[in-house]
Amino acid sequence: MKRYELIVLLTLALALALVAPSAYGWGAATHTVVADRLEKQGGARNADEIYGSCAPDMFNTAFDLPVFGPGGLYELTHDHAEQIWDAARTGRERSLAVGFCSHSDVFGADHTAHHDGITYGAGEGYVIAKVDDMRDVLAAIGYDLPTVLYPLSIPSDAEEEIYHSIIEYALDVLTTRIDPAVGAKLADAARQRSDRFPALFVEAYGDELEDLLGSNAAAIVEVVEEEFRQGMIEYGTLLTLDEEDILAALSLYIADFASGYLALWGVELPDGFDPVPLIAFYLDVAMDLCAADYEAELEATVEAVAGELDDRDIHSSAAGARARRHRR
Ligand SMILES: [Zn+2]
């Protein structure tokens, strides 16, 4: 790798720090493909669907906000996505809302990742099942984190969280094999998303946001959303590179994230220990574990999400909206 290429990768890896470590469902590339295939709107409407489908994760790294736990921002965006749909009025707002709802942990894409896989991981979720598989495979060959870092003691939750994150990034890389344009679609969607999105979000969750964030809620949402949007432009751009370069940048980023994450658990990596090659190896293992069956799960997820949105009359197209009005 040439020096300037390394600098570009390092810059991208740092920019990734702004992106949710996505260890909370599918990665952004998976959500992009789901939204892209849902309704064929084209142009700005399709961009709004794609951006909307990634946006529920926008608070995932806002560690100084009440994100996790009961009633937190994560629960709001993942379990109550329909509130955005109820607030949407214009065509572009409806497209944002369709995407947003497609992510739902209750009836959207995250449900197959976390609760009930369709082709793999029934009753536990595709991603959760793969995390278990990864732990087993690594333990069997003596390369699991507790063995590699012995005599440090690695909390089981921290180990799981790191594998979880690696599986989701590995799936995003596999997604670029299925749809080589996915990175460009994500970056363009983040560039073009309707300016109305932050205001729509505040309208949809006004009362809850005020309870969680106080009277400055709207301003806080605007700042977090803009950081997330920029992060998605960077991440989408990263996913347009060659697979080898994507994996190099992701290894740097995840190694940094994993070291910081372990430090939160009081685990300091020994001086001179370079986690990057280990993470690169883990990404490889994760891709091997998922390469044969991920596409089938993705296809099944698209079909399931389309059906769930249909059941709820959540449609981006004018025809869908007419049907919706008619039924009222
Ligand atoms: Zn999510």
Image (cartoon, rainbow, N blue to C red):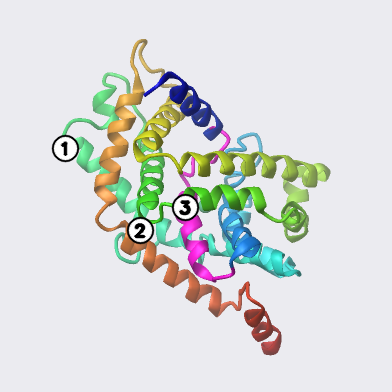
Outermost residue toward the left in this view: 141
Looking at the rendered image, the disc whose residue lies closer to the viewer, 3 or 2, is 3
The reply to whether the C-beta atoms of the residues labelled 3 and 2 are less than 8 Å apart is: no
The one nearer the camera, 177 or 277, is: 177
Most extreme residue toward the top is 271
Q: Earlier in the sequence, mark 3 or mark 2?
A: 2
**42 relative to 4, above or below:** below
CA separation in Å, label 1 and label 2 = 22 Å
Q: Is mark 2 within 8 Å of ligand 1?
A: no
Q: Is residue 254 shown in magenta?
A: no
**Number of other residues with Cα within 10 Å of mark 1, as a class: few under 14, some 14 to 19, many 20 or more:** few
Q: Which residue is mark 1?
A: 140
- Give the Cα separation between the discs numbered 1 and 3: 34 Å
Q: Is residue 22 magenta?
A: yes
The N terminus lies in which quarter of the figure? Answer: top left
Q: What range is drawn magenta here?
A: 17-41
Q: Residue furthest right?
A: 215
Question: Residue beneath label 3, please?
Answer: 182
Secondary structure found at label 2: loop
> Which residue was labeled with disc 2?
124
Q: Give the residue furthest to the bottom.
A: 326
Quarter where residue 221 is shown: top right
Q: CB at mark 1 closer than 8 A to ligand 1?
A: no
- Please state if 10 lies on the left or on the right of 206 as rendered: left
Q: Amino acid at mark 3?
A: Val
Is the C terminus in the top left, top right, bottom left or bottom right quadrant?
bottom right
